[in-house]
């Protein structure tokens, strides 16, 4: 996001409105602009100006027909398993999707969980008795991340497996097992 909120301070132009229209703001900044739009008519007018001004660019682009196999490629790369990780209140905190190949996991924060300085560590808990959690890595609040699933675990992912996020010391668990409180968890489900 631009630190300068104007395109021309003398003219009163609003650069953040242009960034909003272009879709270059992060999720948090976009939500802030959307909140402001309901309360600031001048910002709404500026957004409308930029939509009009930049909308013509899309009209100038000739349509392109994608290759015939595009949809099959998209479907082949779709996640096969997904989980919503919720906190104790039931509020979704993360969404996680396992790729169709089963060798990586994409984790997207659904909300900012904490300002806690501790690390957030993602754990895989396989179904069955006496299964110990397996660390998949550290995640950051507010940042999507792709994590590699170790080959010895990738073949064991099923809709009965669960994911959990715990708060750990900076750098992650010192023991290889969760040591702090679990702040979100959820079961994998088939899509």
Image (tube, grey):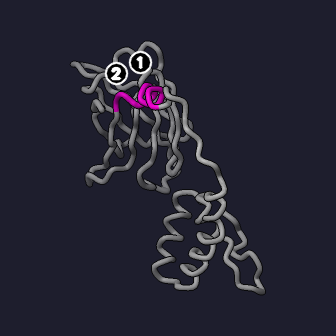
| Element type at mark 1 | helix
Residue 41's tag is none
- Marks 1/2 in contact by CB < 8 Å: the verdict is yes
Indicate yes or no whether the magenta region holds residue 76: yes
Residue occupying the point 65% across, 65% down: 54
Question: Residue tagged by mark 2?
Answer: 157
- Asked whether 34 or 109 is in front, the reply is 34
Question: Residue tagged by mark 1?
Answer: 154
Magenta residues, start to end:
71-81
- Asked whether 151 or 119 is in front, the reply is 151
Q: Left or right of 30: which side holds 76?
A: left
Q: Position of residue 127 (x, y in %)?
A: 25, 22
Location of the N terminus by quadrant is bottom right
Please, which residue is most extreme toward the left here?
129
Q: Position of residue 178 (x, y in %)?
A: 39, 33
Residue occupying the point 40% across, 17% down: 153
Q: Left or right of 58: which side holds 118?
A: left
User: In the figure, 167 relative to 149: above or below?
Assistant: below
- Asked whether 162 or 95 is in front, the reply is 95
- Asked whether 138 or 75 is in front, the reply is 75
Residue 53: quadrant of the picture: bottom right
Q: Position of residue 163 (x, y in %)?
A: 35, 33
Location of the C terminus by quadrant is top left
Q: CA distance from mark 1 to mark 2?
A: 6 Å
Q: Alpha-carbon neighbours of circle 1 within 10 Å: few (<14), some, or many (≥20)?
A: some
């Amino acid at each position: 996001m631009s630190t300068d909120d104007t395109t021309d301070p003398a003219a009163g132009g609003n650069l953040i409105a242009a960034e909003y229209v272009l879709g270059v703001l992060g999720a948090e900044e976009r939500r802030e602009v959307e909140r402001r739009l309901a309360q600031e008519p001048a910002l709404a007018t500026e957004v409308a100006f930029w939509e009009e001004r930049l909308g013509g660019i899309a009209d100038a682009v000739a349509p392109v027909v994608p290759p015939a196999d595009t949809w099959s490629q998209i479907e082949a790369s779709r996640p096969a398993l997904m989980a919503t990780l919720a906190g104790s209140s039931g509020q979704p905190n993360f969404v996680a999707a396992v790729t169709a190949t089963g060798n990586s996991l994409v984790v997207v924060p659904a909300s900012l969980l904490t300002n806690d300085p501790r690390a957030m560590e993602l754990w895989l808990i396989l179904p069955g008795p006496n299964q110990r959690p397996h660390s998949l890595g550290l995640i950051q609040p507010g940042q999507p991340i792709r994590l590699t699933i170790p080959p010895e675990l990738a073949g064991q992912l099923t809709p009965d497996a669960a994911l959990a996020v715990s708060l750990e010391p900076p750098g992650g668990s010192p023991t290889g097992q969760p040591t702090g409180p679990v702040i979100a968890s959820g079961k994998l489900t088939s899509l």
